[in-house]
Image: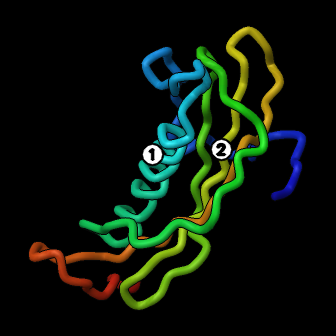
Amino acid sequence: MGREDKPPENSPTIRTIAMPSDTNPSGDIFGGWLMSQMDLAAGSIATKTSGGRSATVAVDAMIFHRPVKVGDEVSLYATLVRQGRTSMTIHVDAWRRPRERDVSEKVTEANFTFVALDDQGRPVPIAQE
Protein backbone atom coordinates (compact mmCIF):
# COMPACT_ATOMS: atom_id res chain seq x y z
CA MET A 1 0.00 0.00 0.00
CA GLY A 2 1.28 3.41 -0.91
CA ARG A 3 1.79 5.85 1.93
CA GLU A 4 0.42 8.95 0.27
CA ASP A 5 0.44 12.10 2.39
CA LYS A 6 -2.77 13.56 1.00
CA PRO A 7 -6.04 12.08 -0.20
CA PRO A 8 -6.94 12.37 -3.90
CA GLU A 9 -7.92 15.82 -5.19
CA ASN A 10 -11.28 14.61 -6.53
CA SER A 11 -14.36 14.40 -4.34
CA PRO A 12 -14.85 11.17 -2.40
CA THR A 13 -17.45 8.70 -3.61
CA ILE A 14 -18.71 8.42 -0.02
CA ARG A 15 -17.96 10.45 3.09
CA THR A 16 -19.30 9.33 6.47
CA ILE A 17 -18.64 9.58 10.21
CA ALA A 18 -17.57 6.56 12.28
CA MET A 19 -20.09 6.24 15.13
CA PRO A 20 -20.01 4.39 18.48
CA SER A 21 -22.44 1.80 17.08
CA ASP A 22 -19.74 0.87 14.52
CA THR A 23 -17.27 -0.38 17.14
CA ASN A 24 -16.11 -3.88 17.96
CA PRO A 25 -16.13 -5.22 21.55
CA SER A 26 -12.77 -3.50 22.18
CA GLY A 27 -14.16 -0.07 21.29
CA ASP A 28 -12.34 0.30 17.95
CA ILE A 29 -14.16 0.76 14.66
CA PHE A 30 -15.00 -2.69 13.35
CA GLY A 31 -13.03 -3.61 10.22
CA GLY A 32 -16.17 -5.13 8.73
CA TRP A 33 -17.92 -1.76 8.96
CA LEU A 34 -15.09 -0.10 7.02
CA MET A 35 -15.10 -2.87 4.43
CA SER A 36 -18.88 -2.50 3.97
CA GLN A 37 -18.48 1.25 3.42
CA MET A 38 -15.81 0.51 0.81
CA ASP A 39 -18.14 -2.01 -0.86
CA LEU A 40 -20.88 0.64 -1.01
CA ALA A 41 -18.47 3.09 -2.69
CA ALA A 42 -17.34 0.46 -5.20
CA GLY A 43 -20.98 -0.51 -5.80
CA SER A 44 -21.82 3.07 -6.69
CA ILE A 45 -19.19 3.04 -9.45
CA ALA A 46 -20.28 -0.46 -10.57
CA THR A 47 -23.88 0.70 -10.94
CA LYS A 48 -22.86 3.73 -13.00
CA THR A 49 -20.59 1.59 -15.18
CA SER A 50 -23.02 -1.29 -15.75
CA GLY A 51 -26.09 0.91 -16.03
CA GLY A 52 -27.97 -1.37 -13.66
CA ARG A 53 -27.70 -4.15 -11.15
CA SER A 54 -24.35 -5.65 -10.16
CA ALA A 55 -22.93 -7.75 -7.37
CA THR A 56 -19.61 -8.01 -5.55
CA VAL A 57 -17.89 -11.28 -6.43
CA ALA A 58 -14.39 -10.73 -4.98
CA VAL A 59 -12.31 -8.41 -2.83
CA ASP A 60 -8.52 -8.39 -2.96
CA ALA A 61 -6.73 -8.77 0.36
CA MET A 62 -7.08 -5.80 2.69
CA ILE A 63 -4.50 -4.76 5.25
CA PHE A 64 -5.59 -2.25 7.86
CA HIS A 65 -2.59 0.04 8.33
CA ARG A 66 -4.16 2.49 10.74
CA PRO A 67 -7.19 2.38 13.02
CA VAL A 68 -10.36 4.38 12.51
CA LYS A 69 -11.63 6.00 15.71
CA VAL A 70 -15.13 6.96 16.79
CA GLY A 71 -15.95 10.39 15.37
CA ASP A 72 -13.46 10.19 12.50
CA GLU A 73 -14.61 11.41 9.11
CA VAL A 74 -14.07 8.51 6.69
CA SER A 75 -13.68 9.34 3.00
CA LEU A 76 -13.77 6.62 0.35
CA TYR A 77 -12.39 7.20 -3.13
CA ALA A 78 -13.50 4.67 -5.74
CA THR A 79 -12.09 4.40 -9.26
CA LEU A 80 -12.86 2.01 -12.11
CA VAL A 81 -9.55 0.34 -13.00
CA ARG A 82 -10.72 -2.44 -15.34
CA GLN A 83 -13.82 -3.25 -17.32
CA GLY A 84 -14.37 -6.62 -18.92
CA ARG A 85 -17.35 -8.01 -20.81
CA THR A 86 -19.47 -8.57 -17.67
CA SER A 87 -17.10 -7.65 -14.84
CA MET A 88 -15.54 -4.52 -13.38
CA THR A 89 -12.63 -3.99 -10.99
CA ILE A 90 -12.96 -0.93 -8.79
CA HIS A 91 -10.14 0.32 -6.59
CA VAL A 92 -11.15 1.94 -3.29
CA ASP A 93 -8.89 3.98 -1.00
CA ALA A 94 -10.11 4.66 2.55
CA TRP A 95 -8.92 7.75 4.42
CA ARG A 96 -9.66 8.93 7.97
CA ARG A 97 -9.61 12.43 9.39
CA PRO A 98 -10.16 13.25 13.04
CA ARG A 99 -13.05 15.72 12.98
CA GLU A 100 -11.13 18.34 14.95
CA ARG A 101 -8.05 18.22 12.69
CA ASP A 102 -7.27 18.99 9.07
CA VAL A 103 -4.88 16.08 8.47
CA SER A 104 -5.99 12.85 6.76
CA GLU A 105 -4.39 9.41 6.87
CA LYS A 106 -4.88 6.53 4.46
CA VAL A 107 -6.09 3.53 6.44
CA THR A 108 -6.55 0.83 3.79
CA GLU A 109 -7.27 0.10 0.14
CA ALA A 110 -8.61 -2.81 -1.90
CA ASN A 111 -9.83 -3.85 -5.34
CA PHE A 112 -13.46 -4.94 -5.54
CA THR A 113 -14.64 -7.08 -8.47
CA PHE A 114 -18.27 -6.75 -9.52
CA VAL A 115 -20.32 -8.55 -12.16
CA ALA A 116 -23.19 -6.87 -14.03
CA LEU A 117 -26.45 -8.81 -13.59
CA ASP A 118 -29.81 -9.03 -15.32
CA ASP A 119 -33.15 -9.13 -13.47
CA GLN A 120 -32.76 -12.88 -12.87
CA GLY A 121 -29.30 -12.45 -11.34
CA ARG A 122 -27.37 -13.81 -14.33
CA PRO A 123 -24.22 -12.11 -15.69
CA VAL A 124 -24.99 -9.69 -18.49
CA PRO A 125 -22.64 -7.80 -20.82
CA ILE A 126 -21.86 -4.23 -19.86
CA ALA A 127 -23.05 -1.75 -22.46
CA GLN A 128 -20.09 -0.24 -24.28
CA GLU A 129 -20.39 3.50 -24.86
Q: Name the residue under label 2.
A: 94
Q: Which amino acid does label 1 sit on?
A: Ser
Can you tell which mark lies on residue 121?
none
Q: What residue type is labelled 2?
A: Ala
Locate residue 114, reporting x and y percent. 41, 71
- Residue occupying image coordinates x 73% and y 9%: 100
Relative height, residue 87 to residue 73 (above, below): below
98 with respect to 73 (left or right): right
Identify the element where label 2 is drawn.
strand
- Residue occupying image coordinates x 73% and y 41%: 107
- Residue 31: image quadrant is top right
Relative height, residue 18 to residue 5 (above, below): above
Q: Mark 1 points at which residue?
A: 36
- Residue 52: image quadrant is bottom left
Q: Distance between the residues labelled 2 and 1?
A: 11 Å
17 with respect to 115 (left or right): right
- Residue occupying image coordinates x 78% and y 30%: 104
Q: Camera-side residue: 20 or 46? A: 20
Select label 2 or label 1 by which is in front: 1
Q: In which quarter of the image is the C terminus?
A: bottom left
Identify the element where label 1 is drawn.
helix
> Within 10 angstroms of label 1, few (less than 14), some, or many (20 or more) residues?
few
Residue found at the far top of this picture: 100
- Residue occupying image coordinates x 76% and y 41%: 106
For the rendered model, the colour scheme is: rainbow
Relative height, residue 69 to residue 104 (above, below): above
- Residue 111: image quadrant is bottom right
